[in-house]
Image (cartoon, rainbow, N blue to C red):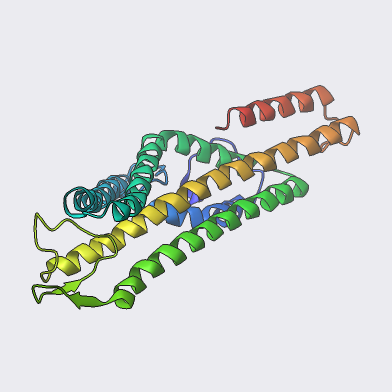
Amino acid sequence: MHPSVWNHTDQPRNPNYEKDIVYVTKHLKWILNVIGVWPVMLKSIGEYLSKIVIVLSNLVVFFIEVLYVLHIILEQQNNFLRLRLLAFAWYTLVSLMKYWALTMRKSNIKCCVEQMYADWKQVDLQRDRTLMLKYGKIGRDLTIYSAAFMYGSSMSFVAVMQYAVGSHVDENNRTIRLLVYPAYSGLFDVQKTPIYETVYILQCVCTFVLNTISSGTCGLAALFATHACGQIDVIMSQLNDLVDEKFTKKNYNPDTQLMEIVQHHMKILKYK
């Protein structure tokens, strides 16, 4: 949802707050919308779409994980290979747990995002806005780097691996086409068409979802942490102004300014 439709009672002091918010959150919003975690502020079709996306993402990852684990337990006889294959199984399980944690805490994420939007709306000094943009750029860059690393490495591996390994003929004169993540063949023959193609596509989707969870989690932490750092710097600059008696308005009561600084600090302490 575009920031302009968010309902805040206070009039914005920062005329550029919409552009600033889009600049800071755009890439993370794209990532988290893919897995339905970015909070929807107004009840609309987007709220139901996010729930559908969450259910479908869980089903795809769970389906691939079950086939993978069954292959390790029932089909794979080499203990060394079992240990190697367990790495991806644990990674998938941990990613699912992170995904569940994100979905269960969507309301907390929404509160933090609302507070961040309010902070951007209420900044009135260009100096403070510059400080917030500096830290916002750091969080934005961290999100981009984590997404580029995750998608670039894993998705390229999944896409290239099939063609790099190719296929081979087994002792029964059957052409075996390898999958990136071995799948249990006791339920259905994964070598048959279109089962093989379907499983391969689902594995690609599963990899994409897992990468999105990891990059989205890192991006969310970077966004909130850097925003809090920016707010702390803003408070420090306000305290320096208070000590030096540099007030933003004429006839401004220093006690009133100190009270506002304390209230601002209390909001930052609750920002978690």
Q: Nearer the viewer, residue 35 or 119?
A: 35
> Could you say where residue 167 lies in the image, as x and y percent from the top left?
22, 76
Residue 73's place in the image compared with 147, above or below, is above
Residue 22's place in the image compared with 192, above or below, is above
Q: Total of numbered circles in the picture?
A: 0
> Could you say where residue 135 lies in the image, as x and y percent from the top left?
67, 49
Q: Residue at x 81, y 32 (%)?
A: 239
Quarter that holds the C terminus: top right
Residue 252's place in the image compared with 179, above or below, is above
Q: Is residue 1 visible?
A: no
> Could you say where residue 142 lies in the image, as x and y percent from the top left?
58, 55
Q: Nearer the viewer, residue 62 or 225?
A: 62
Q: Residue at x 66, y 47 (%)?
A: 14
Q: Residue at x 41, y 50 (%)?
A: 213
Residue 211's place in the image compared with 123, above or below, is below
**Is residue 111 rendered to the left or right of residue 131?**
left
**Is residue 97 rendered to the left or right of residue 174?**
right
